[in-house]
Amino acid sequence: MNLQALPLPYAPGAISGLSERLMSSHHQNNYGGAVKRLNAIRAQLAATPFASTPGFLLNGLKREELIATNSMLLHELYFASLGGDGQTMEPAMRLALDANFGGLERWREQFGACAKALGGGSGWMLLVFNPREGTLVNQWSADHTHALAGGTPLLALDMYEHAYHLDFGANAAAYVDACLAAIDWAGVYARYKTAVHAASEGFGAEQGDIANSLVLDVRRAGVFEKATTQLPGAAWRDPADVAQWATDLPHDRPVTVYCVYGHEVSRATALRLRAIGVDARYLIGGIDGWSNAGMPVEPRGQRP
Ligand SMILES: [Fe+2]
């Protein structure tokens, strides 16, 4: 059963700053080559008598299988990571960058510098969601094989020379800048949302289940300011600053955080609190679901 290469998600000349020739060649030769190689390796493995094959041959095949598989997957993520304007994004994606890096500009500075540091060498720069901590991390990956265990890559930047030499020669820094200006953050956000939801399943609190909790309103600052109500007794904490206030929370009682709908804002915050030992849950349905169920609210408090 042979895998098929996926088509580019846009016309090869559609990415500003990267030529049609470069994108076509990269897609057909390097990505397409990885898919073909993976098919060949799998066919070879299917015909291999494992018990009687020397270890060094098995080692080589399994190593090459992993390299080809990750090359295929990361190239698909790379192509999917481009096609935007590098800055337009959902408020919840912007919040995630604020909470993890101090904002888009600081993320870009860190990610770009790490990518440029790979110029002249090879490897991938990845933005990865770490479900253990509910965090985003910039990760280096060499030889297509380094992965943050359990992590979900959300954005990939190919730093192998074939990704840029046709257009940029040895000027890897200019290639990195062109890619950063073409990131499709809508796609990154869609992958982030899916990953956060999967990681936080099982950590939701039902509406009738929060009586003994410390209740924290973690709606984004702009949303909180426009709101007129909050849950009774709730205190607002800025989810962008979770790293600052998380260490002040008690470890001897449950904490319930809520946002508007119980999506990634409160879920990611709950994951971050759980990682440092707080018994944190997110409110299923958020304050919207709470209000719609006829549960009591009070006028919202002031920002601390
Ligand atoms: Fe590549």
Image: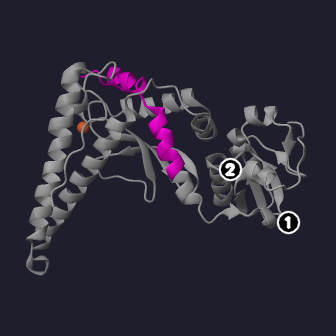
Other residues around mark 1 within 10 Å, as few (<14) / some (14–19) / many (≥20)? few
Q: Is residue 146 magenta?
A: no
Q: Is residue 240 left or right of residue 256?
A: left
The scheme the figure's colours follow is: one colour
Of residue 225 and residue 290, the one placed in the foreground of this image is 290
Residue 72, x across and y down, in percent: 25, 48
Q: Is residue 270 above or below residue 106?
A: below
Disc 2 on helix, strand or loop?
Answer: helix
Type of amino acid at the residue the image marks with label 2 = Ser
Q: Residue at x 61, y 48 (%)?
A: 264
Of residue 281 and residue 299, the one placed in the foreground of this image is 299
- Most common secondary structure along the magenta stretch: helix
Type of amino acid at the residue the image marks with label 1 = Asn
Label 1 to label 2: alpha-carbon separation: 18 Å
| Residue hosting label 2 | 266
Could you tell me if residue 248 is visible in this image? no
Q: Residue at x 68, y 39 (%)?
A: 240
Q: Is residue 171 above or below residue 204?
A: above
Q: Is residue 60 left or right of residue 182?
A: left
Residue 78, x across and y down, in percent: 33, 38
| Residue hosting label 1 | 212
Magenta residues (range): 169-194
Disc 1 on helix, strand or loop?
Answer: loop
Residue 7, x across and y down, in percent: 24, 39
- Residue 232, numbered circle: none
